[in-house]
Image (tube, helix red, strand yellow):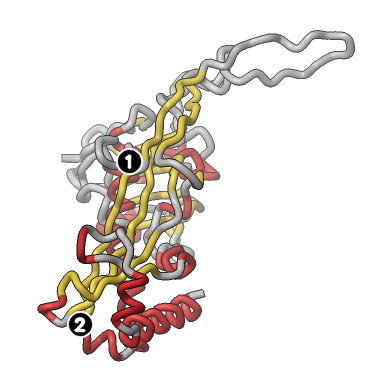
Amino acid sequence: MQLNMSNRIASIARDVMHASPMALATNFGSTLSGADGGYAVPVQAAEEILMPTVGALLPYCRQIPLTSGSSIGMPLDAATPFSDAGIVCAWEDEGAVLPQQKPKLDMTSFSLKKLIALVPVTDQLLEDSDALAAYLPLAMQTAVTRKVNDAIINGTGAGTALGILKSGAVITVAKEGGQAADSIVDANIANMLDRAIDPMSSIWVMNPRCYGHASSFLAGFDGPTRTLAGLPIVTTDSCPELGEFGDLILADMAWYLAVLKTPQLNSSMHLWFDQDMTAFRLTFRMDGSPAIVAPVTPPNSPVTRSHFVALAQRA
């Protein structure tokens, strides 16, 4: 897949360099503002730039593609999945009537937010299509992954997605009595697993410094498989610094809704014409939120649980 994407980027570079003035005038659209124009790049090339990369959280999310419009209403379950107020599921005996119960759902509007990655490319690099194919996808992947991860974890919901740590769905697991600052201990891991609704479907999302700490101090860490307590580890600098709230998160990302549209990739020779540069612009529209509004209480549990559990500050 990476090879196919590189070939497309190389082809794009050749098209941009060799397009006649008349062809450019025909192909320039309105995706870049005003006279800057835009040369549309095949959709598949843009999609492949967003293919899963190391540390990316979006591939773990429940993705909901939006084919038209810029918003959609989605129901979030406002009741616990274990109560009679939620979606009804019952065994029906012969001749019995299934209980009639209106699900208690919160309708939440997801309005797509626009993320733009603008990459300047020198004419010298553009002339070398193979070099461009090696540079451009990684440059855009890195920038987009960092911004999307930050939205999924820290987003306020205003102008960006609602992040895990800013949502009402997250459970905070307190530090142990006498626990040293910036430390992570085995009891933290056990307590976080205890508060997860479905821990075996979850992943650890952590600051890279937590990974180094885990590899040295936690019994359940397995370096060769990059797992902790048997669950996969994803590291990202979008998690707060070691010792701060949320530096370590246990998350079932299938319960994070990511509403998104097909990305668009455009190029323009005009934006930085006086600097002998061509602009490549990737436009990605998405919104997101945890699929539950608050932690839930299972029938045989004295404590609440959630799909998202974070470790408290250890100052």
* Residue 203 coordinates in the image, percent (x, y): 45, 49
Relative vertical location of residue 8 with respect to residue 159 in this rendering, above or below: below
Element carrying mark 2: strand
Please identify, in this view, whether the residue under mark 1 or under mark 2 is nearer the observer.
2
- Residue 215 x/y as whole percent: 34, 60
Q: Residue at x 84, y 14 (%)?
A: 93
| Residue 267: image tag | none
Q: Which residue is mark 2?
A: 122
Residue 154 quadrant: top left
Measured from the top left, where is residue 254 in percent x and y? 51, 43
Quadrant including the C terminus: top left
Answer above or below: position of 234 versus 303. below
Evaluate whether residue 170 shows in this view: yes
Asked if residue 276 lies left or right of residue 104, the reply is left
What amino acid is at disc 1?
Answer: Ala
What is the x, y in percent for residue 47?
45, 63
Mark with earlier residue (1, 2): 2
Of 150 and 114, which appears nearest the observer? Answer: 114
- Observer able to see residue 211: no
User: Mark 2, residues whose alpha carbon is within 10 Å: few (<14), some, or many (≥20)?
Assistant: some
User: Which residue is label 1 attached to?
Assistant: 161
SS class, disc 1: loop
* Image side of residue 103 versus residue 76, left or right: right
Q: CA distance from mark 1 to mark 2?
A: 33 Å
Vertical side of 211 occupied by 303: above or below: above
Picture quadrant where residue 249 is located: top left
Look at 51% across and 33% down and name the residue there.
197
Residue sitting nearer the eye, 217 or 214: 214
